[in-house]
Image (tube, coloured by chain):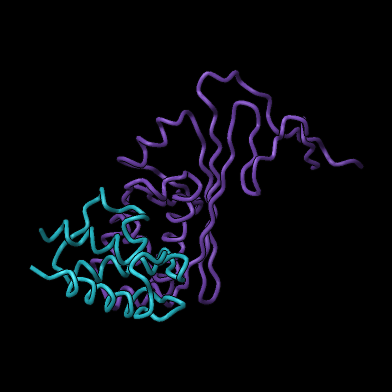
Chain colours: A purple, B cyan
């Protein structure tokens, strides 16, 4: 399949990481975490580290595999930090547990906002969040994309038109 | 109650142990930006937890902001508020 931008004119680049389409805003956040340092934090601070950063569901999933526990926790912490950047919440008083990484039955992960984080984002208008995580060796990383539609803006055509590949 | 010099001494000790800065903590000005000095978001979590242990406090949600842990001075103000 080929993906063709429906209107290049609709894109206005405002900064290296932010592209605004009329009536909408697109922000990204990314973070990378060293898995061995997460292991060190758990060794040093124990349950305090886990319970401060992660929900019980996140901890339960991570601990369901002893071999992958630290990888999963590191990726989830990276996801929370990426979300804080994408959602422009770094200077707000938001608890990490309010940015929960939920794993669906098909293995895909998404962000679920709670409490103050959810309220702050909701106040900024209808929006969509997309999350992707990865880990290899001693590093875990996550990227979050936030697509926000300004309140009061008319519905817009999709950014891209998808056409079948030529024969 | 800790005196200000004692408070700052303990904070510097915590930073030395947990902040993973790219420069010597002893030489850092109290207003120096710790993030610009190499403290990552993960290290700031460790610093927070270590401060809680050192001072027997818990940072409430309203203090979970980047600027609270931005400098030795801002940390000192936060800890002083929590231990008052």
Is residue A66 shown to the viewer in this render? Answer: no
Which residue is at 76% across, 32% downward? Answer: A161
Residue A112 x/y as whole percent: 40, 44
Which residue is at 36% across, 42% downward? Answer: A117
Residue B19 x/y as whole percent: 37, 73
Q: Nearer the viewer, residue B67 or A96?
A: B67
Q: In this view, does A124 lie to the left or right of A53?
A: right
Res B66 quadrant in image: bottom left
Q: Nearer the viewer, residue B35 or A146?
A: B35
Residue A166 x/y as whole percent: 90, 41
Above or below: residue A72 compared with residue A41 = above
Residue lying at the far left in this picture: please name it. Answer: B1
Above or below: residue A128 compared with residue B79 = above
Picture quarter with the N terminus of chain A: top right
Above or below: residue B79 compared with residue A108 = below
Which residue is at 43% across, 77% downward? Answer: A36
Q: Which of B54 and A27 is in front in this view?
A: B54
Res A164 quadrant in image: top right
């Amino acid at each position: 399949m080929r993906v063709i931008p429906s209107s290049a004119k609709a894109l206005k680049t405002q900064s290296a990481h932010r592209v605004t389409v009329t009536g909408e805003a697109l922000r990204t956040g990314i973070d990378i975490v060293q898995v061995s340092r997460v292991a060190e934090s758990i060794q040093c601070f124990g349950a305090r580290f886990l319970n401060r950063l992660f929900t019980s569901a996140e901890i339960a999933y991570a601990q369901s595999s002893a071999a992958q526990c630290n990888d999963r926790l590191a990726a989830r912490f990276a996801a929370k930090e990426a979300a804080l950047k994408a959602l422009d919440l770094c200077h707000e008083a938001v608890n990490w547990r309010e940015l929960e990484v939920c794993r669906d039955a098909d293995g895909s992960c998404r962000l679920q906002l709670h409490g103050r984080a959810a309220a702050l984002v909701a106040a900024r208008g209808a929006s969509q969040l997309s999350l992707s995580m990865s880990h290899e060796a001693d590093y875990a990383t996550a990227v979050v994309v936030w697509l926000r539609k300004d309140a009061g803006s008319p519905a817009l055509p999709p950014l891209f038109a998808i056409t079948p590949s030529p024969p | 109650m800790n005196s200000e010099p004692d408070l700052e001494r303990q904070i510097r000790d915590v930073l030395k142990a947990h902040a993973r800065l790219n420069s010597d903590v002893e030489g850092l000005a109290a207003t120096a930006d710790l993030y610009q000095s190499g403290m990552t978001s993960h290290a700031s979590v460790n610093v927070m937890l270590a401060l809680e242990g050192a001072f027997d406090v818990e940072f409430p949600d309203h203090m979970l902001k980047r600027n609270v842990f931005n400098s030795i001075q801002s940390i000192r103000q936060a800890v002083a508020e929590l231990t008052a």
